[in-house]
Image (cartoon, rainbow, N blue to C red):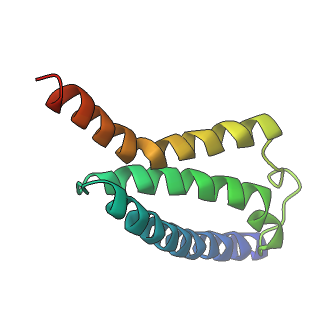
Amino acid sequence: MTKLASSILEMIRMMIIMMIFVMVLGNIEHQILKSWIPWNGLYWLFLFAGNVLWFLVLYRNRLQFSGWYRSAATQHKLSRNTTRIVMAMGMVLIGAPIMITWFIEIVLIHWS
């Protein structure tokens, strides 16, 4: 019963930390990107997906070791290669609004 309770507490802890992390980082990125490009409402999806990937790396490599749930079978850091790939995917997703805006400006506006 204590494993069940600790795993439920850990899930709640993880969700609260993720919501705070994604909201704060997303708002910072939104303010920066809004000053560079015309903002489209769907760009939030790219920021959200990129920030969730970054949170995944942060949680799996650091935060899971300080929580309530302890299990030798599940508490492993991500490999270095996996960490790099997931972080790069997050960066591409966060940079996607800039790339999309530049593509629209260059290809659709200047070539038509």
> Which quarter of the figure has residue 47?
bottom left
Choose between 3 and 66: the one closer to the eye.
Answer: 66
Q: How many marks?
A: 0
Tell me where residue 40 sits by quadrant.
bottom left
Q: Position of residue 100 (x, y in %)?
A: 32, 38
Locate residue 52 relative to residue 108 in the image: left or right: right
- In the image, 31 versus 86, the foreground residue is 31
Residue for point 70% across, 59% down: 58
Q: Determine whether 9 is above or below 26 in the image.
A: below
Quadrant where the C terminus is found in the figure: top left
In the picture, which quadrant includes the N terminus?
bottom right
Percent across and percent down for residue 69 are: 77, 69
Q: Position of residue 62 (x, y in %)?
A: 79, 63
Is residue 30 shown left or right of residue 80? Answer: left
- Seen from the viewer's position, the closer of residues 41 and 79 is 41
Residue 58 or residue 99, whichever sits in front: 99
Residue displayed at 68% across by 72% down: 10
Write the residue at 45% across / 65% down. 26
Furthest-top residue in view? 111
Residue at screen point 23% across, 35% down = 104
In x, y percent, where is residue 35?
34, 63
Of all residues, the one furthest to the front in this rendering is 110
Location of residue 1 with respect to 97 vertically, above or below: below
